[in-house]
Amino acid sequence: MQEVYDFLKEAQTYFLATADGDQPRVRAFGTIDLFEGKLYIQTGKAKDVYKQLVANPKFELCATKGLDWVRVTGSLVPDDRVEPKKHMLDAYPDLRAMYDENDGNTIVLYMKDATATFASLTGAAPRTVTF
């Protein structure tokens, strides 16, 4: 899990896919946080991405760094506690212009039953980790 966190943190941007009925939806994300042994992302409850994840918690994300990439699949579980929201926003202080851990909109979600596949155009064999 630490390796996935480090990769996503260094990549800075990843692309998160969700399902909107039978239509896939993909958007750029930049938040990743390691809290209490879980990997978290952050969004707003008013956003379509959150509504899609409530309806179907399965996700896939992909990020690249140079010739290397990671693809992560699993489920995202909402965690509405103040502590993980504060931890996330403290790690991304620029988000505080739009979000606050007590605003009723901010939500963090942790990855559950996740599988990460690391691959590269260098010819290295793909590696898979689960967490």
Image (tube, rainbow, N blue to C red):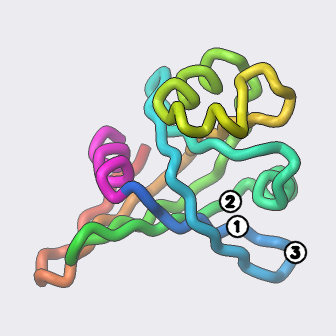
Q: Quadrant of the C terminus?
A: top left
Tell me the kind of residue under disc 1: Thr
Instruction: Give the mark, 2 or 3, whose residue is nearer the N terminus.
Output: 3
Do tag 1 and tag 2 residues touch (Cβ < 8 Å)?
A: yes
Please tell me which residue is depicted at 57% across the width and 56% down the height of the picture.
74
At 71% from the left and 34% from the top, the residue drawn is 99
- The residue that label 2 is drawn on is 58
At label 2, the amino acid type is Lys
User: What label does residue 131 carry, if any?
Assistant: none
Answer whether residue 8 is magenta in the image. yes
Disc 3 secondary structure class = loop
Q: Quadrant of residue 79?
A: top right
Q: Write the residue at 54% across / 22% down.
A: 87
Residue at 21% from the left image edge and 77% from the top image edge? 67
Q: Which residues are magenta?
A: 1-11
Left/right placement of residue 75 relative to residue 68 reads right
Dot label at residue 18: 1
Give percent across and percent down for residue 89. Answer: 57, 29
